[in-house]
Amino acid sequence: MAVEIQAEMVANVWQVVAQEGDDVAEGDTVLILESMKMEIPVLAEAAGVVAEVKVTEGDVVQEGDVLAVIA
Amino acid sequence: MAGKPPRESDPRNPRLRLRALLDEDGYQEVSAYDESGMLAAIGTADGAKVVAFASDPTVQGGAMGAEGCDVVVRAYDRAVAENCPIIGIYHSGGARLQEGVGSLDAVGRIFHAMILASGRVPQISVVLGPAAGGAAYGPALTDVVILGPEGRIFVTGPDVVRTVTGETVDMARLGGPEPHGRRSGVVHVIADSERDAFDKARWLAELLGTQVESRLDEVEDRPLGEILPESPRRAYDVRPLVERVLDTPGLELHPKWAPNIITALGRLGGQAVGVVANNPLRLGGCLDSLSAEKAARFVRMCDAFGVPLVVLVDVPGYLPGVGQEWDGVVRRGAKLLHAFGECVVPRVTVVTRKAYGGAYIAMNSRSLGATKVLAWPQAQVAVMGAVAAVRILHRRRLSQVPDELKEQFELELAAEHEIVAGGLPKAMELGVVDEVVSPDATRTAIAEAIREAPARRGAHDNIPL
């Protein structure tokens, strides 16, 4: 089942760590957001393959935006 | 009430469940095992006295009538008289329809007994099947709610929802582990199985209910500093730190709801403690309306049962924005201020990295009466980060500096500002930080602070905030 990773808060996309097609384990860093003057890693909540990364570095994301999809 | 005997072979029968919950030795039923729909027993959990009751889903789906409710009210009287924890096992469709308003009155009397016992004896609910209506609000009035894999909590089930609103939803999505563990905050602990649910209920009864002899003077230090990332800007998961502060990993309440703050029960030097910790991995560790409410209720529960608090602070502030303001972050954030301010148990704060702004005050600051405030050597205690502060304080001067020199100038101003307004030396001079402590000497420092403080207990209830 595909799992969407959503932004929890308004943030800048600071670094995209996992690429489409990568295998990720639960707890792996998928990308790093920048908000509240902090670099906040966004982790995979389930193991799988990164099916889609919907943002690029420098994007501004809003709360609830889908950042990536893990299938 | 006479009637056909309940189905002994049914795994849902309350006698089996109560026996599985309580120690084998000393198990004693304190109500008749009949058609009332409720069974109560007194016994022990790891040797400590506990009163427990279970609804009986083999009789009218566990529906609660006057007789069954009397069983629960008497069980509450007994727990208060014995001054011991009470554990309720729920699997019930709610009030008995055929008894009409009489059953509503009876369910209301259970609620009243729970409310009067609140803060006096620990109340733990284990929900193993559907718990609707009155059977939903019962657990919600108690201190901790544990949900088994088949547990479902809702005001009204899917059939009524469909009839009234046309909305189609199944029981799991309406009131199962996913919605209540992550979205509603109704459930504190999700269990993997009925056995797991009983084990966690026993553990909680022991943590909240029994004062074991502590060995706070025998606590050993552990390396804690290595958990922080090298960059002070990088967020990290605080849970390994919480685990290492405790003797053995504790029990986290509400792990998936408002995860930007951690609330966990465990032991330090054998002494039961509650840990409240900002988790920078989620929302940068900001306080927001939900996390403030979550922590406030936890602090009040620990205070009511005499459980000392350890507060691990790494907080950039309250989360800003329209969403939060409209959500009542001011009103709900005030609950955390109030909870810490009235708290009389020993409560020790450790600022690991930063404590900024209003969130600094809310996270058990000196001003709110912290027993002791410790800080790690690199910690920042300030209204805001120094660079952010000078951007406001020196806006005009900075605007006259060419862009290529701006960053350097900001850093210079920030260093100057830190000497005057921020930094640990200033905080210690003001007495808002008592001691700078090395991360790897923190466990003993916390233990000593708790040991030196008088063991007290707040005289208040634990309203479900």
Image: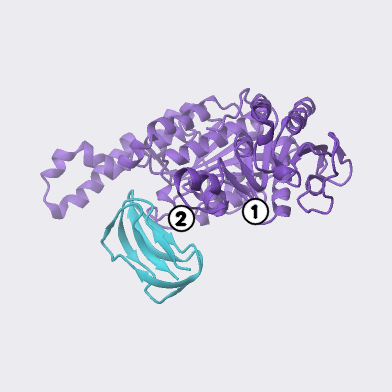
The total of numbered circles placed on residues is: 2
Chain given the colour cyan: A
Quadrant in which the N terminus of chain B appears: top right
Look at 45% across and 71% down and name the residue there: A71
Q: Is residue B116 left or right of residue B40?
A: left
Q: Are marks 1 and 2 in contact (CB under 8 Å)?
A: no
Where is mark 1, residue-wise?
A: B150
Instruction: Work out whether residue B224 can be spotted.
Output: no
Q: Is residue B204 left or right of residue B322?
A: right
Chain given the colour purple: B
Parent chain of label 1: B
Where is mark 2, residue-wise?
A: B236
Dot 2: few (<14), some (14–19), or many (≥20) neighbours within 10 Å?
some
Which secondary structure, mark 2?
A: loop
The verdict on a common chain for dots 1 and 2 is: yes
- How far, Cα to Cα, is label 1 from label 2? 34 Å
Parent chain of label 2: B
- Judge by depth and name the residue closer to the eye, B287 or B168: B168
Residue B59 placed where, x, y %? 76, 44
Residue B294 placed where, x, y %? 51, 39
- Judge by depth and name the residue closer to the eye, B313 or B298: B298
Which disc is residue A37 wearing?
A: none
Between discs 1 and 2, the one toward the N terminus? 1
Residue B416 placed where, x, y %? 27, 40
- Judge by depth and name the residue closer to the eye, B167 or B144: B167
Look at 27% across and 45% down and name the residue there: B387
Name which residue type carries label 2.
Answer: Tyr
Which secondary structure, mark 1?
A: loop
Dot 1: few (<14), some (14–19), or many (≥20) neighbours within 10 Å?
some
